[in-house]
Image: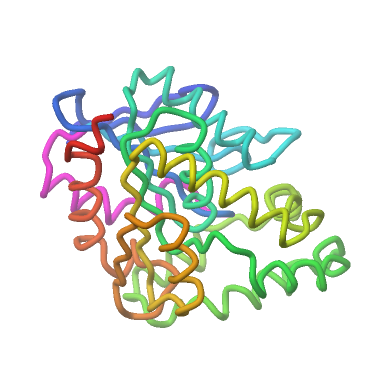
Amino acid sequence: MGDAQRRFGGLAADSHGADGGRPPLVLVHGLTYDRTQWGPTLRELAALDPGRRVLVLDLPGHGESPGRESYQTADVADVVHAAVTEAGLDRPVLVGHSLGGALATIYAARHPTRGVVNVDQPLLLGPFGELLRRNEPLLRSPEYLRLWESLLAGMGIDQLPPAAQEMVRTATTPRQELLLGYWGEILVTADEAFTAQRVRELERIRSLGVPYHYVAGSEPPPPYRQWLESVLPNVIIDVLPGGSHFPHLSHPAELARIIADVGSGPSGDR
């Protein structure tokens, strides 16, 4: 898979492959990480689907991409779209891990898309929103990393292969302004309003016939699965077992197969 480092829409990116008959792919990493997280998945994609056009981005404020004044998710989704447009991609499949999964969902509700692969990002706040709000003073203090480290402790990192564990623990930049910026909406938005916005986005995705895959590292709680399937009846839920929040690192070959198939059918060509 040939590649080139460039900037598109002001974002640092690696561009792989060439345009062809297959839908292009855009890979979006999670909060505090960068595009290098997709290395194992890219290697599997190169073997499974040689020459596929893939754009791998650093989100604003991450990796080699500059920061922004606003990290509102809709604004960031529009920045990603500017990068997609400048790269010349036509209705890509958006693949996002964690925060990137939320951004991929928002993107698909706002911009032409042939598919979404949401890697382990629940779309309801649940206990996480309550946790952030309760710990907002800590998050705004010089001790903010205590909160970040407590969250990492619950992500199943010890279940990953050793090289992946090292990547998760070291290839991360949990700067305070990034956490406050990207989590700012959660801190100020009531759960009901947050849920209503996600429902509107998913209903838009459903109305457009965009294929949607939710790839989880463990079986979703039954109430969440029921909610997601009620709002998005055609959603495909894949569980890559192991319990880690990083299934793209624990099961890169399986994820590559899912990604390669999304958007290739009739519904993905709308």
Q: Residue at x 55, y 80 (%)?
A: 154
In magenta, the rendered stretch is: 32-52
Closer-to-camera residue (110/131): 110
Residue 77 in the image, given as x and y percentages of width and height: 55, 35
Q: Residue at x 57, y 54 (%)?
A: 31
Residue 138 in the image, given as x and y percentages of width and height: 84, 69
Instruction: Specify whether residue 37 is painted magenta.
Output: yes
Instruction: Specify whether residue 193 is painted magenta.
Output: no
Query: Against 231, is 91 above or below?
Result: above
Query: Against 51, is 199 above or below?
Result: below
Assign the C terminus to one quadrant of the image.
top left
Query: Against 195, is 28 above or below?
Result: above
Q: Residue at x 55, y 24 (%)?
A: 10
Specify the principal SS of the magenta part: helix
Assign the N terminus to one quadrant of the image.
top left
Is 100 on the left or on the right of 133, as rendered?
A: left
Q: Residue at x 34, y 61 (%)?
A: 248
Residue 69 in the image, given as x and y percentages of width and height: 75, 33
Residue 118 in the image, given as x and y percentages of width and height: 41, 54
